[in-house]
Image (cartoon, rainbow, N blue to C red):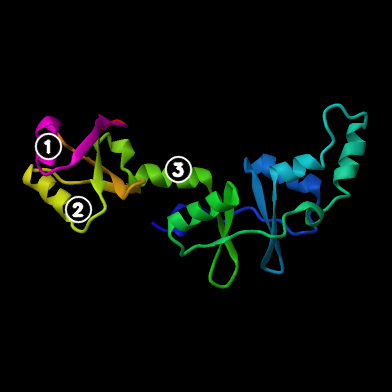
Amino acid sequence: MFVANRMTKHPVLVASTTTVDEAIQLLKKNNIRRLPVVDDGKLVGIVTDKDLMRVTPSAATTLAKYEINSLLSGISVGEIMSKSVISVNESAPIEEAALLMSRNRVSGLPVTSDVGAVVGVITETDIFDAFVNIMDLEEGKTRITLEVADKVGVVCDLAGIVSEAGYNIDSFVTCRKEGGKYDIIMRGDFEDTDALAAALAAHGYVVQHIGRIGHA
């Protein structure tokens, strides 16, 4: 799964000369939280709702409405935008976007093409939706969590045990733990979970949890 499959295409863009007042109206009209800033086809920054709030007078201001509008129309996006903008290529794996967001504490990224054009925006909500899809959560599969040692052949061994029990593994995720251990989460249409758990235990695997998330 790649960024291009999950991003919002044809994003709303602004120029650095766009006024703060215009930017605020664009955010409200399109129900979005960020605007990539593009000059001459090049990404030069990003402005968010938080950036705009910082230069907007508070509700306690004594300014009249026309004075506020005049003030905001006199400030350009280029004056308040973040210039050290982090972006991700549309051909990058979805997990690269997730890692960039996590490392840089941001909730969204402009997406660029190979020639540097802004072709989309990907947000934390898009990442969450991708996770739900990867884990097949909407289908209401049974979830089995195992603790396993870090050794060659574990995945092949588990697949064989599940296959011998007459089931398919619909999703398979690993998570590294301390002490050379891993948690492995398998999801599938496992009907007789007691028998499958017994088969796994017979091969030395510790079954930590069996449950069901989502709806079939």
Mark 3, residue position? 128
Residue type at mark 1? Answer: Leu
Alpha-carbon neighbours of circle 3 within 10 Å: few (<14), some, or many (≥20)?
few
Mark 1, residue position? 196
Residue type at mark 2? Answer: Val
Residue type at mark 3? Answer: Phe
Nearest to viewer (mark 2 / mark 1): 2
For this orientation, the residue located farthest to the top is 60
Residue in front for this viewpoint, 22 or 123? 123
Q: In the rendering, at what x and y percent does residue 55 appear?
A: 82, 42
Dot 2 falls on a residue whose secondary structure is: helix
First in sequence, mark 2 or 1: give its number: 2
Alpha-carbon neighbours of circle 2 within 10 Å: few (<14), some, or many (≥20)?
some
Q: In the rendering, at what x and y percent does residue 27 appear?
A: 68, 43
Alpha carbon separation for disc pair 3 and 2: 28 Å
Above or below: residue 209 compared with residue 86: above
Q: Residue at x 89, y 49 (%)?
A: 74
Nearest to viewer (mark 3 / mark 2): 2
Look at the image and say whether residue 41 sits in the magenta stretch.
no
Q: Quadrant of the N terminus?
A: bottom left
Is 46 on the left-hand or right-hand side of 75? left
Dot 3 falls on a residue whose secondary structure is: helix
Magenta segment boundaries in residue numbering? 191-213
Q: Residue at x 19, y 53 (%)?
A: 154
